[in-house]
């Protein structure tokens, strides 16, 4: 890197931060409102979501390479993101079938993080006026 600040990285960092905050708030909320088993299922789903997001950031950054062979390698490895979610869902649903809702909400934290960042950007004032 040349030391320049990448604004895209700031957005990704804020999405990750929002996911962590939602996870920290969601675990006790599920525990108090439903059950501690639901809180556990939510926590497992949230950790899987964070792992999915982190893997996504890592593999996508590596795909931006001039080498077509490396792009294909990282594209193939990105299937691991889907496998991660599938393994977590399969294992947890076999063990705790009644906790599908908190698990699914936990898994979808990356979507909530992205939506929160999008809402933040909607209300942010632009630094420069758009070109005519």
Image (cartoon, grey):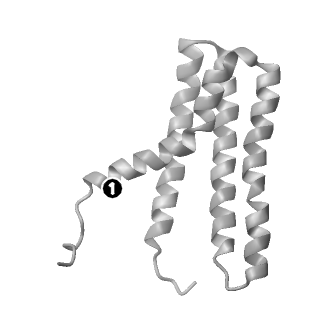
- The residue shown at (47%, 54%) is 14
Q: Seen in the image, is 71 located left or right of residue 50?
A: right
- The residue shown at (21%, 73%) is 130
| Vertical placement of residue 88 versus 120, above or below | above
Q: Seen in the image, is 101 located left or right of residue 125?
A: right
Residue 109 percent location from the top left of the image: 56, 39
- The residue shown at (26%, 52%) is 123
For the image, the number of numbered tags is: 1
The residue that label 1 is drawn on is: 121
Residue 1 percent location from the top left of the image: 58, 83
Q: Residues within 10 Å of mark 1 (few under 14, many from 20)?
A: few
Q: Seen in the image, is 131 located left or right of residue 69?
A: left
- The residue shown at (53%, 13%) is 33
Q: Assign the C terminus to one quadrant of the image.
A: bottom left
Residue 127 percent location from the top left of the image: 24, 70
| Vertical placement of residue 31 versus 109, above or below | above
Determine the image quadrant of residue 7.
bottom left
| Vertical placement of residue 101 versus 6, above or below | above
| Vertical placement of residue 56 versus 104, above or below | below
Determine the image quadrant of residue 64.
bottom right
| Label 1: which secondary element | helix
């Amino acid at each position: 890197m040349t030391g320049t600040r990448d604004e895209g990285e700031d957005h990704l960092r804020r999405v990750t931060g929002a996911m962590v905050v939602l996870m920290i708030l969601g675990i006790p909320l599920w525990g108090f409102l439903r059950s501690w088993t639901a809180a556990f299922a939510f926590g497992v789903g949230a950790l899987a979501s964070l792992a999915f997001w982190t893997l996504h950031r890592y593999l996508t950054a590596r795909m931006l390479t001039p080498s077509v062979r490396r792009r294909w390698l990282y594209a193939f490895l990105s299937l691991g993101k889907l496998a991660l979610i599938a393994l977590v869902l399969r294992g947890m649903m076999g063990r705790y079938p009644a906790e599908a809702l908190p698990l699914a909400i936990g898994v979808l934290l990356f979507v909530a993080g992205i939506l929160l960042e999008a809402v933040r950007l909607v209300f942010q004032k632009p630094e420069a006026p758009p070109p005519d």
